Image (cartoon, rainbow, N blue to C red):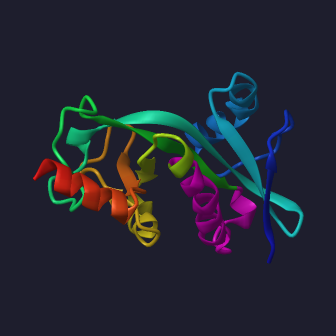
């Protein structure tokens, strides 16, 4: 199978991932792109549109990163927050689910997003996971910020993109 991405257009009719709130976000994504509030891409498999993913820029409070994270550094220099690229959703149409399309797409999405963290001051890639997908996202390096679901039933997760060399410099600075 060949996965490709292309820009969203205003024709999103007929898409159904089985989650009404995500379907609603997908429907609004074209306008969010036009307004520069998000970037949304179609996920195509062998030329057939199978889903969408969308991301935006956000902030993450340092206190949301668990104390056990080896890269967590207490400092007020950054106002105790970091910028993140937040994956708003990764949605596969129901008729293409359970065919490993998301499993093939997520590494490619991360390959697209990680270089952006090197060019602009962004340290984390974040997302809100459905409870039943937490372990799946952990396979790709994401860690939960909490074990308690939010009001929508999601678990916030993060992927730290700080290069190891930068971490070493920070450790030396704050010792």
Name the residue: 46% across, 43% down: 122
Give the camera-side residue of 88 and 21. 88
Q: Residue furthest left?
A: 175
Magenta stretch encompasses residue 96 = yes
Q: Is residue 34 above or below residue 60?
A: above
Q: Can the viewer see residue 174 in this picture?
A: yes
Name the residue: 37% across, 52% down: 157
Image quadrant holding the N terminus, namely bottom right
Q: Is residue 119 above or below residue 99?
A: above
Name the residue: 89% across, 64% down: 47
Q: Is residue 59 above or below residue 108?
A: above
Q: Quadrant of residue 78?
A: top left
Q: Can the viewer see residue 18 in this picture?
A: no
Q: Residue furthest top?
A: 35
> From the viewer's perspective, is 161 left or right of 1?
left
Q: Residue furthest bottom?
A: 1
- Residue 151 locus on image (x, y percent): 33, 36
Q: Which residues are magenta?
A: 93-117
Secondary structure of the magenta portion, mostly? helix
- Residue 161 locus on image (x, y percent): 43, 57
Give the camera-side residue of 135 and 61. 61
- Residue 102 locus on image (x, y percent): 62, 65
Q: Quadrant of residue 51?
A: bottom right
Name the residue: 27% across, 56% down: 169
Magenta stretch encompasses residue 28 = no
> From the viewer's perspective, is 53 left or right of 34?
left
- Residue 83 locus on image (x, y percent): 42, 37
């Amino acid at each position: 199978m060949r996965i490709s991405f292309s820009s969203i257009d205003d024709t999103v009719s007929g898409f159904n991932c089985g989650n009404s709130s995500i379907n609603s976000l997908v429907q609004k994504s074209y306008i969010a792109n036009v307004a520069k509030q998000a970037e949304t891409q179609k996920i195509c498999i062998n030329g057939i549109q199978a889903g969408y993913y969308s991301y935006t820029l956000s902030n993450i409070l340092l206190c949301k990163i668990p104390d056990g994270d080896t890269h967590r550094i207490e400092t007020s220099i950054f106002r105790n927050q970091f910028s993140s690229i937040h994956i708003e959703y990764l949605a596969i149409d129901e008729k293409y689910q359970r065919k490993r399309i998301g499993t093939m797409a997520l590494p490619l999405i991360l390959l697209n997003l990680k270089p952006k963290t090197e060019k602009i001051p962004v340290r984390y890639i974040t997302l809100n996971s459905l409870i039943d997908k937490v372990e799946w996202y952990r396979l790709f390096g994401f860690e939960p910020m909490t074990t308690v679901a939010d009001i929508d039933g999601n678990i916030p997760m993060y992927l730290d993109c700080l290069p190891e060399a930068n971490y070493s410099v920070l450790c030396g600075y704050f010792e």
